[in-house]
């Protein structure tokens, strides 16, 4: 008897919860007032700026002299560490 009362109460609560999840609108769409949308005036279009005049360098730029010379180590030497630091 006790078990059937618990099942009956759970079923009643489930039915009540499902009836509360109604997706129908509470009033019809005919009762609603249409929403007025105000359109903003677009900002005035500005013409694009004139292109900058092309500037030419009268003297050519010299090549950079701070480049390092190419390495002349063999592949075996390039694998060797440059310091004797030990990593633990």
Image (tube, grey):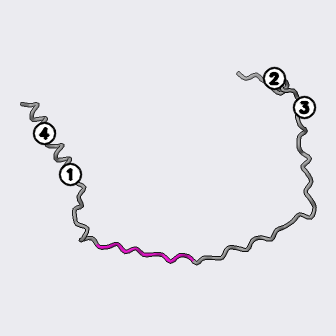
Secondary structure under the numbered disc 4 in the rendered image: helix
Q: Nearer the viewer, residue 17 or 87?
A: 17
| Number of callouts | 4
* For discs 2 and 4, the disc positioned in front in the rendered view: 4
Left of 81 or right of it: where is 3? left
In this figure, which residue is indicated by the disc labeled 3? Answer: 72
**Image spot of residue 31 (x, y percent):** 24, 71
| Magenta stretch contains residue 21 | no
Secondary structure under the numbered disc 3 in the rendered image: loop
Magenta range:
33-43
Secondary structure under the numbered disc 2 in the rendered image: loop
In this figure, which residue is indicated by the disc labeled 1? Answer: 20
In this figure, which residue is indicated by the disc labeled 2? Answer: 84
First in residue order: circle 2 vs circle 1: 1
Left of 28 or right of it: where is 77? right
Give the Cα distance between marks 2 and 1: 77 Å
């Amino acid at each position: 008897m006790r078990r059937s009362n618990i099942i009956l109460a759970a079923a009643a609560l489930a039915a009540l919860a499902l009836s509360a999840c109604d997706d129908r609108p509470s009033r019809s769409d005919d009762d609603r007032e249409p929403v007025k949308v105000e359109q903003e005036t677009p900002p005035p279009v500005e013409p694009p700026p004139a292109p900058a005049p092309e500037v030419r360098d009268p003297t050519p730029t010299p090549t950079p002299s701070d480049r390092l010379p190419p390495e002349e180590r063999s592949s075996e030497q390039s694998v060797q560490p440059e310091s004797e630091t030990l990593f633990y």
